[in-house]
Structure formats: C-alpha cells, structure tokens
Image (spheres, rainbow, N blue to C red):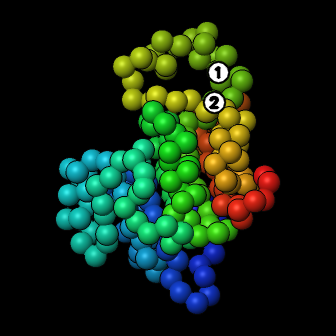
C-alpha cells in the first residue's frame, strides 16, 4: 500500500526516512526501489543488525522523542513510522519531528493499533486488564479522531485513514497518510 501512495519527484530520488526502523528491512526495500532511504531507531542492537544486514543503507541510533532529529530539516519527501506512535510517552514529538524534517507537501505514513467504539467496548467487557496492561509496551491508544486532531495540531492534513486486519468493527490496525501543510494554512 505504501509504495502505491508514493510519488517520486521527477528530478531526483525520493528521500525516505523510517522512524523506528528496527532491523532495517523497510529501509532496504525503499533503497531497492530507488529511494535515498535512511532509518532511525532507538535500539543500538537493532541498528547494529540493520547495518550488518543492509550495509549499503544508512541507520542512526536516536530516540524519536528527542529533538532535533539528527537529519537535515526539510529534507525528506516521506517519513514512515509503522507501529511506533503507541509506544511513545510523547507522541507529539514524533509528529512535530516528522514535520520538521519533511519538505513542504511531504508525507507522513504511520500505523497504530485500531481503537474504535465497538472494539473498545468489547475490550472493556472481555479483556481490559490484559489489553491495557500497565506493564505492557503500548503507552498510548488512539481513536481515529484523536489521531486526526494530533496530526492537525502538528501541521498535517490527513489524506487517508484505512483500517487493516480482521474485520469491521474490530480492525487490527489503523494506517494514516498525511501531508505536511504549508505554513499558515489551516487543516
């Protein structure tokens, strides 16, 4: 789906940054498709594995929560953060960081576990403590409305929201495709 949404610039290679790049497989796939691709990951061990597995690609150890990011401002066409935002204590840092490194009109693609009304009611009734485990790795849970608001407040216009996996109304994931707004434009 991601590749079908990307529109490489006519005059140069697409500049691609993955936040939470893990062992680098998506970065390597983007590079194989002709993008200038980089990865940023908090885990030094994962970055070491990514560098060994994909030596032609660039990976950096850095926390998404810490700004400024160690990449040039306004230099990327797309920032990708798949299954990252729910793990962050300050999710706005991801969005504002992405807005800072994206060129005007650039795109952010992100995914997060789906949380809609019916699914939330089912979780509440059947497995609240297990799903919202206080020792679990997910720190944040987003409705579509909350994601749209946070993205708008961070300088993005949401172009697509898709739900993936399982069936309506208990989808597994939410995919968001958002464009960085021109400064001064409203959502």
Q: Position of residue 22 (x, y in %)?
A: 33, 52
Q: Which residue is mark 1?
A: 120
Answer with the quarter of the image where residue 55 lies.
Answer: bottom left
- Classify 10 Å Cα crowding around label 1: few (below 14), some (14-19), many (20 and above): some
Residue occupying the far bottom of the picture: 11
The residues bearing labels 1 and 2 have C-alpha atoms spaced at a distance of 6 Å
**Residue at horizontal 42 percent and vertical 44 percent from the top:** 65
SS state under label 2: loop
- Does any portion of residue 22 appear in the rendered image? no
| Residue 4 as seen in the image, left or right of residue 90 | right
- Does any portion of residue 146 appear in the rendered image? yes
Location of the N terminus by quadrant is: bottom right
Instruction: Name the foreground residue: 132 vs 157.
Output: 157
Give residue 6's mark.
none
| Residue 22 as seen in the image, left or right of residue 33 | left
Residue occupying the far top of the picture: 125
Answer with the quarter of the image where residue 38 lies.
Answer: bottom left
**Residue at horizontal 72 percent and vertical 24 percent from the top:** 117
Q: Position of residue 34 (x, y in %)?
A: 46, 80
Decide: marks 1, 2 in contact (CB < 8 A)?
A: yes
Q: Position of residue 169 (x, y in %)?
A: 71, 30
**Residue at horizontal 48 percent and vertical 12 percent from the top:** 129
**Residue at horizontal 49 percent and vertical 67 percent from the top:** 73
Q: Position of residue 142 (x, y in %)?
A: 61, 33
- Classify 10 Å Cα crowding around label 2: few (below 14), some (14-19), many (20 and above): many
Give residue 115's mark.
2
Instruction: Name the foreground residue: 180 vs 68.
Output: 68
SS state under label 1: helix
Q: Earlier in the sequence, mark 1 or mark 2?
A: 2
């Amino acid at each position: 789906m991601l590749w079908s949404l990307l529109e490489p610039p006519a005059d140069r290679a697409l500049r691609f940054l993955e936040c939470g790049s893990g062992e680098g497989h998506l970065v390597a796939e983007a590079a194989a498709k002709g993008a200038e691709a980089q990865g940023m990951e908090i885990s030094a061990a994962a970055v070491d594995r990514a560098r060994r597995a994909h030596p032609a690609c660039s990976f950096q150890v850095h926390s998404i929560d810490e700004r400024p990011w160690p990449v040039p401002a306004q230099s990327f066409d797309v920032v990708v953060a798949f299954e990252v935002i729910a793990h962050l204590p300050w999710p706005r840092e991801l969005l504002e960081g992405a807005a800072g490194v994206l060129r005007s009109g650039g795109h952010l693609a992100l995914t997060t576990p789906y949380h809609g009304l019916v699914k939330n009611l089912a979780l509440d009734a059947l497995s609240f403590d297990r799903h919202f485990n206080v020792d679990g790795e997910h720190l944040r849970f987003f409705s579509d409305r909350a994601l749209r608001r946070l993205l708008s407040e961070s300088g993005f216009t949401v172009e697509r929201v898709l739900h993936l996996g399982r069936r309506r109304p208990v989808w597994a994931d939410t995919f968001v495709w958002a464009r960085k707004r021109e400064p001064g434009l409203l959502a």
